[in-house]
Image (spheres, rainbow, N blue to C red):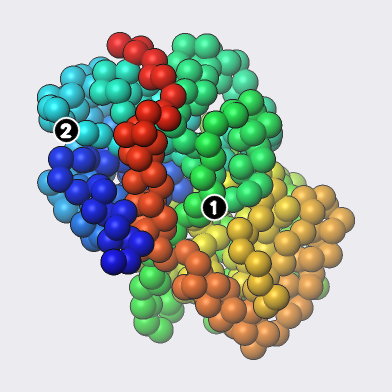
């Protein structure tokens, strides 16, 4: 019997795995994407899994279909109040009614949100194991963002949620270190995000994407695809690009993503100050075929973040065969000797020099590096491989419960 079959055997019968995320809508980016695609991979593996989020109905069923998750495996909490709060006061009651007397494993994605409060309450009521995936939210830089709001959330529910969790799921050894530095002394499993296979994008679609975004023939595209947020460190990229595009004018920087907390206005102002309006395209958030075309059209992908867990967009770019340029705010959790991109300190001098090297590298060399990137993703970051590791983790947590080695549950009802 395979390792996955053995783990799934322990998860069969009346055992239910609940994946929880604040949102799985396109603007949820990595957290929602990870929860949705992990749930779909677990369903393919035969696990009795449900996915829970707090979303408008119009935002989610298309996403479930795209990921391959059966519609009946999705549970939607009705959104009450401002969408950014992701508040659904009847969700706990809805889930308790649905679950009955089943044995449950909870897996909560993200922290500092109402969904963490749901996890605390459900765990207390159901007396079940709880796995929490912070998705980079406990990295030192991330903790400096909105510190007052996080302090209040920590006092009300988040610290209890984290410190009494059965296990925290880190995306890399680097994130595991950050989790331990935060003060968590329990079990930490290191399991990466996965990525879906690239979709085919034909020459006509690519040409239309370029026309739509005013990218003339012969231009080379550098792609940034992420939230337009201070954490993503766009000013570093813009300054380095401005310094180099004067000597390499064939390059166009495409910035795809949604605005977070008004940072877009700061980015627009910097673009004007640097006088690079003719070389930069801001195309807003992308999904579906538009996102496919963005990746397929690019020559290289850049993410200059201050810190990350394991960004989905980087893995997606690698799956599309694109070399990557990233800062040392995170580390790819595999060891390889092949060249698949650039990893540079998040400082203006080194980053500017690295970007010049990127912009003077031939298309053939970039394509070779992209092929290496794709091979790495195919070997290490397939969702079905991640689901196998998740099943083993869940099964071991159940064994801990049955052996009487679990932590005491805190009833926060």
Q: Is residue 212 left or right of residue 335?
A: left
Q: Residue at x 59, y 79 (%)?
A: 372
Nearer to us in this view, 361 or 99: 99
In this picture, is 238 found above or below 362? above
In this picture, is 301 found above or below 91? below
Nearer to us in this view, 162 or 246: 162
**Rendered location of residue 136, percent (x, y):** 57, 41
Asked if marks 1 and 2 touch (Cβ < 8 Å), the reply is: no
Q: Residue at x 35, y 40 (%)?
A: 399
- Disc ID at residue 36: none
Pick the quarter of the image with the C terminus: top left
State which mark lies toward you, 1 or 2: 2
Hey, which residue is sitting farthest front in the picture? 403
Evaluate whether residue 197 shows in this view. yes
Q: Which residue is mark 2?
A: 102
Nearer to us in this view, 310 or 182: 182
Q: Quadrant of residue 44?
A: bottom left
CA distance for labels 1 and 2: 34 Å
Element carrying mark 1: loop
Element carrying mark 2: loop
Circle 1 crowding by C-alpha within 10 Å: few under 14, some 14–19, many from 20: many
**Rendered location of residue 112, percent (x, y):** 48, 26
**Rendered location of residue 138, percent (x, y):** 60, 33
Q: Quadrant of residue 224?
A: bottom right
Say whether disc 1 or disc 2 marks the residue closer to the N-terminus.
2
**Rendered location of residue 362, percent (x, y):** 70, 85
In this picture, is 99 found above or below 48? above
Q: Residue at x 36, y 34 (%)?
A: 403
Q: Residue at x 79, y 69 (%)?
A: 356
Q: Which residue is mark 1?
A: 311
Pick the quarter of the image with the N terminus: bottom left
Circle 2 crowding by C-alpha within 10 Å: few under 14, some 14–19, many from 20: few
């Amino acid at each position: 019997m395979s390792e996955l079959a053995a783990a799934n055997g322990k998860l069969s019968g009346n055992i239910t795995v609940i994946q929880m995320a604040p949102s799985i809508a396109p603007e949820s980016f990595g957290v929602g994407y990870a929860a949705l695609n992990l749930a779909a991979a677990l369903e393919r593996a035969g696990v009795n899994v449900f996915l829970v989020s707090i979303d408008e109905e119009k935002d989610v069923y298309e996403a479930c279909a795209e990921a391959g998750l059966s519609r009946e495996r999705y549970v939607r909490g009705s959104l009450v109040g401002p969408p950014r709060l992701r508040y659904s006061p009847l969700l706990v009651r809805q889930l308790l009614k649905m679950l009955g007397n089943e044995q449950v494993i909870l897996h909560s994605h993200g922290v500092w949100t109402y969904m963490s409060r749901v996890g605390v309450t459900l765990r207390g009521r159901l007396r079940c194991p709880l796995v929490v995936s912070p998705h980079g939210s406990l990295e030192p830089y991330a903790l400096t963002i909105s510190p007052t709001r996080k302090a209040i959330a920590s006092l009300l529910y988040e610290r209890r949620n984290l410190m009494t969790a059965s296990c925290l799921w880190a995306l890399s050894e680097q994130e595991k270190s950050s989790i331990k530095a935060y003060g968590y002394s329990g079990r930490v499993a290191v399991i990466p995000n996965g990525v879906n296979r690239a979709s085919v994008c034909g020459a006509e679609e690519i040409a239309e994407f370029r026309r739509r975004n005013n990218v003339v023939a012969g231009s080379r595209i550098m792609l940034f695809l992420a939230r337009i947020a201070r954490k993503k460190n766009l000013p570093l990229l813009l300054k380095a690009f401005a310094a180099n595009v004067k000597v390499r004018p064939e390059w166009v920087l495409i910035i795809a993503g949604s605005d977070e907390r008004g940072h877009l206005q700061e980015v627009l102002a910097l673009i004007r100050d640097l006088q690079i309006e003719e070389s930069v395209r801001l195309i807003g958030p992308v999904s579906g075929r538009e996102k496919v075309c963005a990746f397929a059209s690019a020559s290289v992908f850049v993410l200059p973040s201050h810190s990350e867990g394991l960004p989905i967009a980087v893995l997606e770019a690698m799956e599309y065969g694109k070399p990557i340029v990233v800062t040392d705010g995170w580390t790819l959790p595999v060891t390889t000797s092949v060249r698949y991109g650039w990893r540079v300190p998040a400082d203006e001098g080194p980053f500017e020099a690295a970007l010049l090297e990127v912009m003077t590298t031939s298309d053939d060399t970039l394509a070779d590096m992209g092929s290496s990137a794709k091979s790495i993703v195919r070997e290490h970051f397939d969702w079905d491989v991640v689901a196998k590791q998740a099943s083993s983790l869940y099964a071991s947590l159940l064994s801990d419960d049955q052996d009487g080695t679990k932590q005491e549950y805190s009833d926060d009802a």
